[in-house]
Image: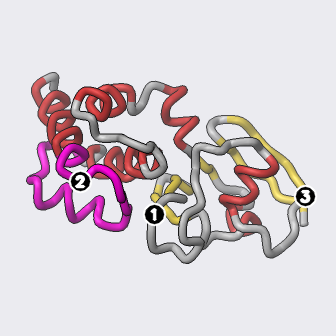
Amino acid sequence: MNISLMVNGEQVEADVLPRTHLVDFLREQLGLTGTHLGCEHGVCGACTLRLDGVIVRGCLVLAVQADGGVVETIEGLSDSGEIADLQAAFIARNALQCGFCTPAMLIAAQDLLQHGGVPSREAIREHLSGNYCRCTGYQAIVDAVETTAQAREASR
């Protein structure tokens, strides 16, 4: 099937098999490997990306379902500078270790922070609860998100 969609600000047209998952299309056909595959059942969150402004699990969405849509991956959010402060906080707080969960964690955290204000640590944990990290124990990740929220609020 032929699909046409906007990926990280660029119009893309491609032929895909109807059963191709969005994350597989992004990784294999477009070379956007920042979105990872973990469980392939929508549980671990490693495949988190934005589709039409909403975070979704790329392993649960077929590429044909994104036809006509706008897809934003970690590469797009990084290149645009949208999450530069969040990335810096992750580095400063040692909120990444192996890095496998980091792209999806950043996307989920940015989704929360887009609402403004400084969410409680409990709210941060709740919002990130669909993203598994087996290395950091989450404390540093919550610290990084909280620090970014505080800095953004102070600059308003």
Whichever of labels 3 and 2 marks the residue nearer the N terminus, that label is: 3
Amino acid carrying label 3: it is Asp
Q: Name the foreground residue: 19 vs 142.
A: 142
Q: Name the foreground residue: 52 vs 126.
A: 126
Amino acid carrying label 2: it is Tyr
From the viewer's perspective, is the residue at label 3 or at label 2 nearer?
A: 2
From the viewer's perspective, is the residue at label 3 or at label 1 nearer?
A: 1
Whichever of labels 1 and 2 marks the residue nearer the N terminus, that label is: 1
Q: Which residue is mark 3?
A: 15
Q: Position of residue 92 (x, y in %)?
A: 25, 27
Q: Which residue is mark 2?
A: 138
Residue 11 occupies quadrant: top right
Examine the structure image and report whether residue 131 is included in the region drawn in magenta.
yes
Q: Which residue is mark 1?
A: 45
User: In the image, is 55 to the left or to the right of 70?
Assistant: left
Q: Position of residue 95 (x, y in %)?
A: 28, 40
Disc number at residue 125? none
Question: How would you rate the neighbour count of disc 1 (Cα within 10 Å): few for under 14, some for 14-19, many for 20 or more?
Answer: many
Whichever of labels 3 and 1 marks the residue nearer the N terminus, that label is: 3
Q: From mark 1 to mark 2, how far is it between C-alphas?
A: 14 Å
Q: Position of residue 1 (x, y in %)?
A: 90, 66
